[in-house]
Every structure is written in C-alpha cells, then in structure tokens.
Image (cartoon, rainbow, N blue to C red):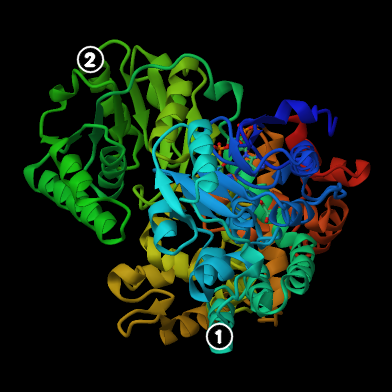
C-alpha cells in the first residue's frame, strides 16, 4: 500500500514461455506515483531473481503509456524509491526489457521508455519531456539518455521546447525502434517474441556514447537566456544535458541536483498551479450535467471579434452563419475570416485541407431570419445596450425554441439584455478575447435566469473550441475587465505622479509581462479607453481621483496607438519608441494639477501595480463574481498575458502573504484612501493566516 493505493492495483505481471509482461494500470494517465514506483521496482527485481523469463515487456493499460511523475506529489516530501533509482534498476536488468508506447509517453513516462532496452511505439503515439513547462527538467535520466539515443541537438530541442514528438519522428531519430499497430498487450507479446528470435535488437542506453559539442551547448544556453530571461529551468536543462559526456552515474547526479534546484523555485509552484488551474476551472458542477446540442452556430457581426469568433468555431468544425447588416461589412467579415484561417495555416496550426473545409462551412448572410435553424447565436456587435437589446428582441422571434442566445459583450449586463427576450433561460454571456481565434480564455457569464443546461453548453462549447472556459457572474467587466479597470488606474496614477509610461512598461516587462500596460493600450487602441471614460463620466465616483487627463489629451490629438501610428509610442520605425510629444502632455497635466513629480523605483512600480490587481481580484472572489481564486488566476493567464510562471495574481499574492499586503495597502492609503482600501477578505486572511490556495481547496 502506498498513499492509500494498493501496489497490486496499479502493477501486474504475467510470465509464460520465457516472456514476462509488466502492466502499469494507474488511471487516468498512469502517472508514476509512489505505488507504481514500488511495484515497477519489485516486478523487475522479482523477475530477475526468478531467472525464468528471458525477456520483459512493459506496457500500460488505459488510454496512454505513463504521462510522467504524479505532479500532485510535487512540493511534498519525496518518497522512496525515487523514479531515477527505479529506472536505473530497469536499465541494469540482466533480462532485456522492451517497452511499448501508446498515447502520450511524457516526462517520467518517456524516461521509463528511454531506460528500457528497446522501444516499440503504437502508431499515432507521441513522446515528450514537458518538464520545462512545469518549471522543471527531466529528472529521471531524460537529460542523459535522450542525447545518447538521438544526439545532442534533438535532445536539447525536445527538452527545451517540451513539445510532443510524433513517434514517426522519434523513429527517424532512433529513439523508438519500431512503429506498429495493435493493442498494447498484443504488441508487447509480439515485441518480446521478436527479442527472443533476434529480430528486435536490444541495447542498454547507458552504454551508448553521447555525441558532445560544447559549442552547441554554449549557443543553446545563450539562446535560452535571451529568449526566456525570466525562467530558471531552461538554463538548468542545458546544464544537465551538458553532463551527458560524463559516465552516466555522474551525469545522473548532475541532473538530479539541477532537478532539485528547479523543484525549490516559486516558478515551479506557479507553473504547476497553472497546469492544474487550467483543468480546475471547468471541473465545477455548473460545467457538468445535460447540455444542448450545438451543431450549427450563428455569429452576428463581422468585425474583428465576430470574425475571430467565427474563425474559432470553423476551426473546431462547426458550421457558421455570419450575419452583417450591409454587404461591405459582410465582405470584410469573410475576408477577415479567410485571413485568420490562412494565418493559422502559415503558423502550422491548421492544415490546408481543414482550412478549405472551414471556409466551406461558412455561410455569410444579410438576413437575420436565416438564423431560424441554428442552435446557438453569438452576438458580437457594437457595445451599446440598446443595440444589443434590439438584436436579442429580434432573435427571440426568429430563433427556434431551445436555441441558445449569447452575447460577446465585454462588460454589459446580461440580465438586462435577457429582458428583451421571452426566453431569459436561453441567454448567457460568452466573452471571447481578441484575437478570438488565438486567445484561449472564454468568460462564461451566468445570468440570473440562465438555464443549467445552457451554462453547461457554454462549457461544452469552450472545450470544443479548445478554450479555457471560466464561470463569471454579471457585473461591469465580469472578472478580467473589472480587475483591469482598477489596476489600470494605478498605472495612470504612477504616470501622473512621476513615472514615465516607458518606465512603467519596462518595470512590468521585467516582472514578466510580455507587454507593459501602455504598449497594450496602444495595441488595443487608446480610443477604446477614451470611450469607456466618456461612458462612465456621468456615473464616476467624484471621490475617485480622475486618472484620464493624459490619455484624453493623447486621444484628442487623434493618437490612438498602433492603428494611427502613434500613441504612447511611435510605430513608424518597427520597434516602438516613446512618443516625445507625450512627455510634454504629461508635464502640462502635472503642472495643471499642481503635481510635483516624484521618483518611483521599478520595484515600487511593480508592487503598486500588482497590489492594485490583487485588491480588485480579491474583491471579485469576495463578492462571488468569480467562483474561486484559481478562476481569477486562469482569466489572467489565458486572457491578459500574465506571466505563467507566476501562476496568476492571487497565486502570486500568496507568495507575498495577506498580512504584508494589508500593511502595504495601508501604507499607500496615506496618499489616496479612496483608491487604496483593504478588502475585507484580505483583512480576514491576514488575521487567520489563510491563503488564496486555502480558498481554492474550499472550492
Ligand atoms: N500527474 C498527475 N495528474 C495528471 C498528470 C500528471 N503527470 N497528467 C495529467 N493528470 C491529470 C489531470 O490533472 C486530469 O485530472 C487528468 O489527469 C486528465 O488529464 C520525473 C518530474 C497526459 C497529455 O507534464 O500533458 O514526469 O482534472 O485533462 O487532455 O522527469 O494530462 O481529471 O482530475 O490533461 O487527455 C511530466 C502532463 C510530469 C504531462 C493528457 N508530465 N499531462 O491530456 O487529459 S513531471 C506532464 C498532460 C515528470 C520526471 C518529471 C496531459 C496529457 P482531472 P487531462 P488530456
């Protein structure tokens, strides 16, 4: 028994006619948890001690060969035997061991195969070492055995990319010996017989001389430092692989130490939080239960969002009827969709055949009446309530009973939209993020009358589109945009009070954001924020310090960012350069407001910006707009370019601690007590020592 798991339940052996079969059966992905390690070690040892078998064949039950170590064990005290030790026993087995790979042999799973003496793959399988995506490195011999089998460059590519390698490619590289068809156990028996009759050669990986090229390693190290300056484990991967010219026991020691170095980092914790979080957000009651069939979709609006949404649905194999009010708009929509699909093909994300099939499933129309037979309509038109209510009123009359009516609105009240229909139970929000055929986040907004099956259908659609569906309740901006509105103020206050836009951007890019907030605004279009400020002008809280003066003046010049060639930056010479005119605007606004600019350190900028994000994120959890902290984290990882290795704003908050955050906010409140207020939830956590991770467990 190990961790409540009977070893016999996860490992079984059969012996007959000189052949011993070992089967790992540990659903759902045959992870090499403690019981599996104990069982595999015992099986190898017992078969060798019995001395009857002349060959061992190792395979897995279920849908895949083992997908690696049990990630849930990470961060807990390690339990013996470790996987590296078990794999040394496999490699040093006097009886040759052949492994049979099916599904996705990843991480420690692929490392098991590398430690066996021959590898037979079942057609369609993939192998890979994705540890770097978890802030780790292959810690069970992968950095030592893969270079020996397939050469330094291929090993570095696989280990640093974390990509899944089709076994057809692995065969070419000599990593697998055969690619066959059949069921794993049958293939295992056949492979064992081929070893016995000499038609399948076995060899110990550790006895193969690894090709070695210091120049390749040095160039690779320079490359990873340049490409991912924030990440810790890529350089450690190279360090471990660089030991493959040593005797394997020494190389494995270097690998082990490098692995343990990675295991200790907050980056490993953040990336594993992201891995499980991506799955947790749809692992909720609202995403389960009966759904309505969605076989045909209507999209209203051929603008950027509507075209992106239509593209996403077409790529998923869903026929789309695209509605526009005028022929030129419809033509633009079709052209944008075509461009999106061609872009997916050129990026290698879509085959040409699938691109053609997608185009064939697109039916443009000027007639809203043509939506009478669709199962779901996604409205993506102008963000004005009266426009949306008019459309939903018409859809109510046109669409068949049971059709789902969704709005892609990014902040408007779904409940109010639903009042323009006689079927509020069929109405929900499906908030896509631009570009909708690329960004994986989908906020699924639950109206107070949204039917349970309609909500579950939203999650089913997210899965079909390979999106990360996150449940959100109705409020201005739902989860992401509501929080963005708050910390966006912080960025504006920093510039009003003394920092430059480029300093704020640089500080946050050094923290890990792909782009700072001013570059993001320039990219999205400064006019969007300008319209929002105007929309909110009449209802703005007078106690709130207005932060839009600088951006307003930039917009009044017609400078809307990339789309006009200038905003906070100039875009006419490739890389963006700070717009020199903006400095003058900033000085003038400060002078008019009587602000004496002060210096901010990059650290102070990051602390303020992140604390502002955490404050509103905490409120969003506190008032139930988001179900749990992890839902907010995933919104930011998949919709807002938050650095994945930091796990998300509330995972990051736990690395600071509630008490420290409360103290920090109270310090800032001395400057602006209205903006800087401590959320009750944070004060409670500071008092009882709980964390956002604890709240996630409460679910
Ligand atoms: N450990 C624990 N649970 C895992 C797991 C793992 N390695 N992989 C998947 N699961 C859970 C997952 O959380 C989900 O649980 C269920 O299995 C189905 O997964 C020593 C140290 C294999 C391609 O990084 O890439 O080995 O939500 O929804 O879409 O060097 O899972 O149902 O409760 O993703 O069909 C390296 C990670 C580990 C592989 C299948 N291995 N897994 O995808 O199903 S580190 C990985 C995947 C390591 C060694 C090092 C995918 C998949 P629940 P799923 P899927």
Q: In this view, does 482 lie above or below 645?
A: above
Q: Name the residue under label 1.
A: 213
Residue 179 location (% of width, % of height): 41, 48
Q: In this view, does 420 lie above or below 303?
A: above
Is the residue indicated by label 1 positioned so its CB lies within 8 Å of ligand 1? no
Residue 244 location (% of width, % of height): 65, 75
Secondary structure at numbered mark 1: loop
Tell me, yes or no, if residue 674 can be seen here.
no
**Crowd around label 2: few <14 · some 14–19 · many ≥20 (10 Å):** few
Left or right: 550, with 603 as reference point: left
Q: Mark 2 points at which residue?
A: 397
The C terminus - image quarter: top right
* Residue at the spot 49% in from the left edge and 24% down from the top edge: 447
Tell me, yes or no, if residue 509 can be seen here.
yes
- Distance from the alpha carbon under mark 1 to that under mark 2: 70 Å
* Residue at the spot 43% in from the left edge and 87% down from the top edge: 580
Q: Nearer the viewer, residue 547 or 145?
A: 145
Q: What mark, if any, has residue 225 been given in the picture? A: none
Left or right: 490, with 82 as reference point: left
Residue 560 location (% of width, % of height): 35, 68
* Residue at the spot 49% in from the left edge and 75% down from the top edge: 153
Outermost residue on the left side: it is 327
Secondary structure at numbered mark 2: helix
* Residue 236 occupies quadrant: bottom right
* Residue at the spot 24% in from the left edge and 35% down from the top edge: 300
Q: Which of 611 and 123 is in front in this view?
A: 123
* Residue 471 occupies quadrant: top right
């Amino acid at each position: 028994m190990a961790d409540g798991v009977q070893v016999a339940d996860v490992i079984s052996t059969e012996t007959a006619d000189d052949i011993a079969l070992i089967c790992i059966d540990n659903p759902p992905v045959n992870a090499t948890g403690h019981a599996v390690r104990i069982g595999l070690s015992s099986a190898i040892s017992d078969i060798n001690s019995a001395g009857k078998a002349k060959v061992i064949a190792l395979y897995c039950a279920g849908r895949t060969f083992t997908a690696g170590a049990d990630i849930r064990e990470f961060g807990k005290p390690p339990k013996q035997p470790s996987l590296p030790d078990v794999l040394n026993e496999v490699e040093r087995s006097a009886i040759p061991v052949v492994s049979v790979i099916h599904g996705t042999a990843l991480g420690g799973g692929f490392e098991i195969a590398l430690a066996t003496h021959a590898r037979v793959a079942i057609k369609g399988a993939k192998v890979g070492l994705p540890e770097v995506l978890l802030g780790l490195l292959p810690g069970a011999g992968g950095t030592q055995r893969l270079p020996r089998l397939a050469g330094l460059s291929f090993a570095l590519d696989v280990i640093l990319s974390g990509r899944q390698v089709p076994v057809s490619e692995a065969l070419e590289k000599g990593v697998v010996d055969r690619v066959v068809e059949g069921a794993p156990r049958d293939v295992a028996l056949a492979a064992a017989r081929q070893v016995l009759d000499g038609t399948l050669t076995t060899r110990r990986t550790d006895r193969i001389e690894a090709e070695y090229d210091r120049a390749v390693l040095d160039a690779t190290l320079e490359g990873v430092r340049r490409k991912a300056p924030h990440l810790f484990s890529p350089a450690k991967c190279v360090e471990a692989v660089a030991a493959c010219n040593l005797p394997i026991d020494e190389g494995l020691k270097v690998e082990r130490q490098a692995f343990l170095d990675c295991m200790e980092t907050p980056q490993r914790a953040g990336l594993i939080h992201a891995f499980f979080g991506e799955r947790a957000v749809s692992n909720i009651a609202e995403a389960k239960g009966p759904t309505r069939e969605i076989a045909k979709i209507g999209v209203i609006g051929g603008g950027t969002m509507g075209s992106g949404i239509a593209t996403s649905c077409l790529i998923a194999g869903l026929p789309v009827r695209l509605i526009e009010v005028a022929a030129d708009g419809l033509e633009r929509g079709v052209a944008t969709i075509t461009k999106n699909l061609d872009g997916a093909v050129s990026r290698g994300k879509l085959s040409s055949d699938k691109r053609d099939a997608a185009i064939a499933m697109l039916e443009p129309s000027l007639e809203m009446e043509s939506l009478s037979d669709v199962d779901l309509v996604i409205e993506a038109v102008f963000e004005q309530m009266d426009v949306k209510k008019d459309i939903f009123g018409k859809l109510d009359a046109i669409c068949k009973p049971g059709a789902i009516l969704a709005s892609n609105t990014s902040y408007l009240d779904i409940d109010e939209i639903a009042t323009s229909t006689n079927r509020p139970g069929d109405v929900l929000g499906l908030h896509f993020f631009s570009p909708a055929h690329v960004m994986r986040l989908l906020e699924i907004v639950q109206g107070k009358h949204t039917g349970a099956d309609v909500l579950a259908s939203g999650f089913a659609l997210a899965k079909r589109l390979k999106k990360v569906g996150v449940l959100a309740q109705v409020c201005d901006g739902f989860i992401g945009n509501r929080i963005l509105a708050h910390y966006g103020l912080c960025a504006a206050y920093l510039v009003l009070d003394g920092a430059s836009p480029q300093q704020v951007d640089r500080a946050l890019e050094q923290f890990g954001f792909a782009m700072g907030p001013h570059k993001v605004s320039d990219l999205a279009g400064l006019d969007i924020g300008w319209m929002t400020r105007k929309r909110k002008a009449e209802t703005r809280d007078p106690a709130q310090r207005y932060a839009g003066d600088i951006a307003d003046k930039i917009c009044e010049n017609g400078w809307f960012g990339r789309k006009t060639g200038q905003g906070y930056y100039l875009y006419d010479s490739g890389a963006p350069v700070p717009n020199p005119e903006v400095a003058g605007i900033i000085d003038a606004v400060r002078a008019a407001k009587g602000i004496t600019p002060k210096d901010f350190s990059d650290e102070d900028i990051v602390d303020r910006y992140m604390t502002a994000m955490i404050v509103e994120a905490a409120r969003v959890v506190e008032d139930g707009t988001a179900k749990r902290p992890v839902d907010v984290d995933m919104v930011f990882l998949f919709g807002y370019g938050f650095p994945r290795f930091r796990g998300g704003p509330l995972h990051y908050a736990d690395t600071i601690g509630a008490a420290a955050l409360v103290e920090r906010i109270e310090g800032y409140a001395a400057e602006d007590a209205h903006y800087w207020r401590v959320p009750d939830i944070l004060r409670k956590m500071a008092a009882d020592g709980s964390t956002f991770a604890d709240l996630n467990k409460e679910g």
